[in-house]
Image (cartoon, helix red, strand yellow):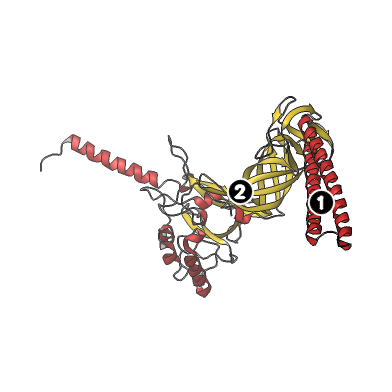
Amino acid sequence: MPRLRPWIIFAVLAVVGAAAFFVLRGRGDPAEKWRTQAVDRGAVEVAVSATGTIQPVEKVEVGSQASGTLSWLGADFNDRVRKGQVIAQLEPSSYRTAAAQSEANLARANAAFAEASRNFERSRELKERNVIAQVDLDAAEAAFDQRKAEVKQAQASLQSARVNLGYTTITSPIDGVIIARAVDIGQTVAASLSAPKLFQIAGDLTRMQVETKIDEADIGRVAPGLSATFTVDAFPEDTFEGTVRQVRLEPLIEQNVVTYTTVIDVSNPELKLKPGMTANVTIRIEKKDDVLRVPNAALRFRPPETPGAPRATGANASARGAGGGEGRAMAAAGEGRPRGRRSGGAAGAAGDSSAVRRGPAEGGRGGVASAGAPDGFKRQMVYTLGPDGKLEPMRVATGITDGTHTELRSRELAEGALVVTGAQPKKGQAAATGTAPPGMGGPGGQRGGGGMRRF
């Protein structure tokens, strides 16, 4: 038998050594390969965020129904005005002339009416003595009625001329503050099809409102009476509070996005809030204090299916299978359940079938029964580390979420229990959390493990 060449022996030893290195590396302490975070107790608040504009509750634009040159201004920016106070005056010469002409026309009509009235009375007396014919009496009566109508027409013309003359004096319709002035002395105001805006008056500035646009995906949870908080850039350290007063039914479509205007009442006793400020609004939908919370990263975590990664053993290994594999494996006779859970019997089978029926709508990919999970809550998957350091799947019932933590409703996990949130980074690699297989969602069955919509 010919002797083996030394380089062949060296190559075989190198291959065996490399294989042993990777095997031993894969059998290292699994606890060092996963990042964990403890289940804690605290507050969970569901809220809807949006931006809005601060506006006065009462705001009136003052215009002019008459055309002319502005001859006098009686109010300026930030001036307080009272209802009925004169704030501007148009040149009234042409309107006074029109009123005087209408007065003359009325006087002429009254004179003609008086003459027609005398003729009608004379004709009626003559007819009673049969001096004139009936046709002459009828003509005198018609002339009387005509002159009477002319008097009414002249009176109406005079009233219209006086009203137009009154329009040259601009008065404040409400008590408030001038927040905008659009004209100067000497400027010509042309009131043709619409009244030009001269002033903008805000009512009581101690009562303000925030008009914000809520996306159609969130508007179903917003209702009058909910509390809201907001901040403004002018006072970044102050938080203002308000109450939702109105959710308007008119849909607003901008770039194919449907929103609904929501009005929030705000008290402004210190007059810090000014019209037009941008408010960063948070509307509180629901808040729970001192509840068990599980990190959302743990709900999004799914073990990576890569060679060399630690895998759950036994029946738990099938719990990661996509398409309901874990439900089929664990629903049978309560096998492979994580420690601390009640299992077996009809109750266990019923719990598994319920989880399978809910399917993706509740973030599930199968059915691990959750002992003590309240009905009506979502059931989602988390992973813990067993005594041997292996991943163990656990399905838990969850409630509301604030995007960072989710309320834990079932009793499988106690305060301080560690749940897996991702894989420990290897040397030269950034930290990465496990993600759901393609086509599967994160918590709540949503696609993609990155974001989570607040329930």
* x and y, in percent, of residue 92 in the image: 79, 31
- The answer, for residue 53, to whether it is visible in the render is yes
The residue carrying pointer 1 sits among few (fewer than 14), some (14 to 19) or many (20 or more) residues within 10 Å by Cα, namely some
Q: Earlier in the sequence, mark 2 or mark 1?
A: 1
Q: Looking at the picture, tell me which residue is in the foreground, 447 or 26.
A: 447
Whether label 2 touches label 1, CB < 8 Å:
no
Disc 2 versus disc 1: distance between alpha carbons? 63 Å
Task: Residue type at mark 1: give it.
Answer: Lys
Kindly identify the residue that appears in the image at 85 percent across and 56 percent down: 123
- State left or right for residue 256 relative to residue 176: left
* x and y, in percent, of residue 343 in the image: 52, 68
* x and y, in percent, of residue 308 in the image: 37, 47
Instruction: Tell me where residue 236 sits by quadrant.
Output: top right
The residue carrying pointer 2 sits among few (fewer than 14), some (14 to 19) or many (20 or more) residues within 10 Å by Cα, namely many
Above or below residue 312? Residue 93 is above
Kindly identify the residue that appears in the image at 59 percent across and 67 percent down: 375
Task: Residue type at mark 2: give it.
Answer: Ile
Residue at the disc numbered 2? 214
Element carrying mark 1: helix
- The answer, for residue 269, to whether it is visible in the render is no
* x and y, in percent, of residue 121 in the image: 88, 55
Q: Looking at the picture, tell me which residue is in the foreground, 375 or 6.
A: 375
Residue at the disc numbered 1? 148
- State left or right for residue 320 relative to residue 12: right
Q: Looking at the picture, tell me which residue is in the foreground, 428 or 248.
A: 248
